[in-house]
Amino acid sequence: MRARTKQKVLENTAYHEAGHAVAAHYRHVKIQRATIVATADYLGCVSHAPIQFAKDGEFDDSLRGIDRAERSIIVCYAGPLASRKFQPQAVCGTSARFSCHCQPPTIT
């Protein structure tokens, strides 16, 4: 990969991961680790405390459960949205191997 392309990928990764981290911080989710150092599976990663929005395998439809589900969704989508805001031409990930890895909760 050319140096200029590597720099663009690194910059996009930084915006993406910063989006997750800022959203987590704003929504009071404890961030455990944030990095833009690539691994075999990811270009970057933000690890945070688990957000529990289910009780005994069932969706918790209390106000607290709904708030937790919203936190999870916001943190999940903040990465791709930050990438788009600061680099509209960029795509999330550079290949199928490096794709967005967050999964929002399924609410039925």
Image: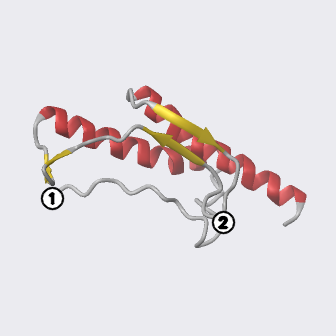
Considering the image in quadrants, where does the N terminus appear? bottom right
Residue 85 appears in the picture as rendered? no
**Front-most of 50 and 82?**
50
Residue most toward the right? 3
Q: Amino acid at mark 1?
A: Thr
Q: Position of residue 99 (x, y in %)?
A: 56, 64
Q: Position of residue 52 (x, y in %)?
A: 26, 42
Tag 2, which secondary structure? loop
Tag 1, which secondary structure? loop
Q: Position of residue 40 (x, y in %)?
A: 66, 64
Q: Amino acid at mark 2?
A: Thr
Neighbourhood count class around disc 1 (C-alpha, 10 Å): few under 14, some 14–19, many 20 upward: few
Residue found 65% across the figure and 57% down from its top = 90
Q: Position of residue 9 (x, y in %)?
A: 73, 55
Which residue lies under the disc numbered 1? 108
Q: In the rendered view, would you say 30 is above or below 91? A: above
Q: Which mark is residue 94?
A: 2
Neighbourhood count class around disc 2 (C-alpha, 10 Å): few under 14, some 14–19, many 20 upward: few
Residue found 15% across the figure and 54% down from its top = 57
Residue found 58% across the figure and 44% down from its top = 17
Q: Which mark is residue 62?
A: none
Q: Is residue 37 left or right of 92 when viewed as pictured?
A: right
